[in-house]
Amino acid sequence: MARARFRRKPGYTIPTTRVSVIVISPDRKILLVRHRKGNRQYWVLPGGRLEYGETFEECAVREIKEETGLDVEVVRFLFLSEAIAPDRSRHIVNVYLKAKEIGGTLKVGNEPVLAGVDYIAIDELENVTLFPPVAEHILKNLSQGDPDGMEYLGNLWV
């Protein structure tokens, strides 16, 4: 079987790795961060780019602190997905971890893209614009009581 050949965009040689963190409060709310790009606003799971030499867990703890002011402890890995632009201009590998809040004070971080941070009721998750679109997978995972293993969700480019 012949392998598909893809052209790389000049200057891009490897995908970006983003760690996303799912934090559920005891009263069944999920921690989300609101991003703004131009006139658009949407929700994302807190997290960010994995830095060289940093573990997934270290990245999760750092990004949550930077974006939300909270301290967390990683519980387990949940999902893995990709986001590949149709024109192959961007390729992001998303790693989803579940964590629990262990301290800190909820506040919006200093990054210009951050427009807000809040705990949203799990029941409202399907009604918010969430990127990547993983609400269904989060709800499924919660209803199954943290099944063993890690699930690959495929290419979720929107």
Image: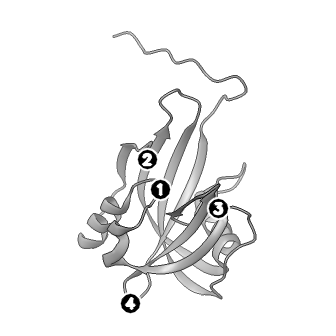
Decide which of tag 3 and tag 2 comes sooner along the chain.
3
Going from N to C along the chain, the mark reached first, 4 or 1, is 4
Q: CA distance from mark 3 to mark 2?
A: 17 Å
Q: Residues within 10 Å of mark 1 (few under 14, many from 20)?
A: some
- Determine the CA span between mark 4 and mark 1: 23 Å
Q: Residue 51: image x %, image y %?
A: 71, 52
Q: Residue at x 34, y 75 (%)?
A: 124
- Viewer-side residue, 24 vs 97: 24
Q: What residue did someone put label 2 on?
A: 81
**SS for dot 4:** loop
| Residue indicated by mark 1 | 131
Residue located beneath label 3 in the image: 59
The residue at 37%/84% (across/down) is: 28
SS type, badge 2: strand
**Neighbours of disc 2 within 10 Å: few (<14), some (14-19), many (20+):** many
Marks 1 and 2, the one that precedes in the sequence: 2
Q: Amino acid at mark 3?
A: Cys
Alpha-carbon distance for marks 3 and 4? 26 Å
* Quadrant of the image occupied by residue 138: bottom left
N-terminal of the pair, mark 2 or mark 4, is: 4
Task: From the image, tell me which residue sits under label 4.
Answer: 27
For the point 59% across and 47% down, which residue is it?
17
